[in-house]
Amino acid sequence: MSLNFNFSAEHESVRDTVRRLCRDELAALVTDAEESETFPRHVFKRWGELGLLGVRYPEADGGSGLDKVSDCIVREELSYMSQAFASSWSAHSHLGIWPIWKAGTPEQRKRFFVPALAGDKIAGFGLSEPDGGSNVRALKTRAQKVQGGWKLSGSKLYITNAPIADFLLVAARTQPELKPESISLFIVELPNKGFDIHKLRKEGIRASETALIHIEEAFVPDDCLLGGREGTYPVILDSLSENRVGVAANALGMARAAFDAARTYANDRIIANKRVGDYQAIAHKLADMSAQIEAARWLVYYGAWRVDQGTLDAATASRVKLVASETALAVSEQAIRIHGGAGIMREYPVGRIHRDALVYVIGEGTSEVQRNIIARSLGFKP
């Protein structure tokens, strides 16, 4: 890796664009969206107009033609404002459409990928299941071949954007054997009478709509089998590895937001004619939080650089995600402690940030799963 750790002028321009959008347009929407647990759909169109849904995709395919570092900058800044908004963005712009760009037929790209880039259609990714958790190979949803298409049956759990999506990528077994090559992806347009979508109420990322889905003999035509072929499991793995670097950037944004709120409070709050931050116990907490964030920042952008170089491996992606997500959790907890009683009041953001941070030591592969992947890369078999 080059020893030049500076972001380019283009990177800083992307950061400035997202910060201004958050400050001038989106921040005012967060409180109502959190309280109502409803995502404002029109935001997708605005993201599309600014090219933020296509950051990672080539200009020739309708994207913005930027790199993974730029993608992580967008994620970091959206998460600094609201992880719920960033989560909905990520489920759409990466998990929901990246496999279509990567492996879809030209017709599938035109029909789904292009309008999704513009924010005219909202996407999601149906992978996790009630019994499988983070184990993709334990997937039980089945796809049976019928005349003109397939019939899907099974269930999906914790599917981001499902209540508002126009289509979902859904993973299902096209063969009965419990082996990776039997897993395929289908593009399912919604509504579909075989899909019963139950919106879930959550403690974290409340404004990002999430669902449990019961699937009963849902018909999907042949032209909606991703790539027109079975066995797209490798596409799922590639998507998850790269997205782990992405969600690490989300965690970095949350950690920064919690730290800045705590630092401001420690500066403004006076006890016994002394700023809270001037007490050594609080000053040491802030010092540790600052160091943790700085370490996570460079690991995240190292991971992004590895993506851009085409050298990202699963263990590196897991290290990045593990460190960043645990940092966000630890920093947001300390931010609550620094606020004292104010930390559990909704007038302050640190309680929300901590609830949201908890999602990412679980979602996108738990911290325990990340540790298993890392351990296996070291030659052990946990």
Image (cartoon, rainbow, N blue to C red):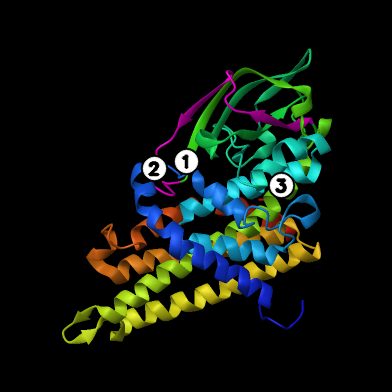
- Asked if residue 376 is among those painted magenta in the image, a careful observer would answer no
Give the x, y percent position of residue 86.
52, 54
Give the x, y percent position of residue 15.
58, 69
Quadrant assignment, res 182: top right
Distance in Å between CA atoms under marks 1 and 2 = 7 Å
For disc 2, the marked residue is: 37
Q: In the rendered view, tell whether residue 342 sits above or below residue 42.
A: below
Give the x, y percent position of residue 340.
25, 68
Residue at the image position 38 percent from the left and 64 percent from the top? 333
Residue at the image position 66 percent from the left and 65 percent from the top? 70
For disc 1, the marked residue is: 209
Question: In the image, which disc is placed on residue 166?
Answer: none
Q: Which residues are magenta?
A: 182-207
Residue at the image position 39 percent from the left and 54 percent from the top? 30
Tell me if mark 3 has few (under 14), some (14-19) or many (20+) residues whose alpha carbon lies within 10 angstroms of its own. many
Q: SS for tag 1? A: loop
Distance in Å between CA atoms under marks 2 and 3 = 26 Å
Task: Say which label, 2 or 3, has the lower sequence index.
Answer: 2
For disc 3, the marked residue is: 98
Give the x, y percent position of residue 197.
51, 27
Distance in Å between CA atoms under marks 3 and 1 = 20 Å
Q: Residue furthest left?
A: 272
Circle 1/circle 2 CB separation < 8 Å: yes
Q: Nearer the viewer, residue 162 or 335?
A: 162
Q: SS for tag 2? A: loop
Tell me if mark 1 has few (under 14), some (14-19) or many (20+) residues whose alpha carbon lies within 10 angstroms of its own. many
Q: SS for tag 3? A: helix
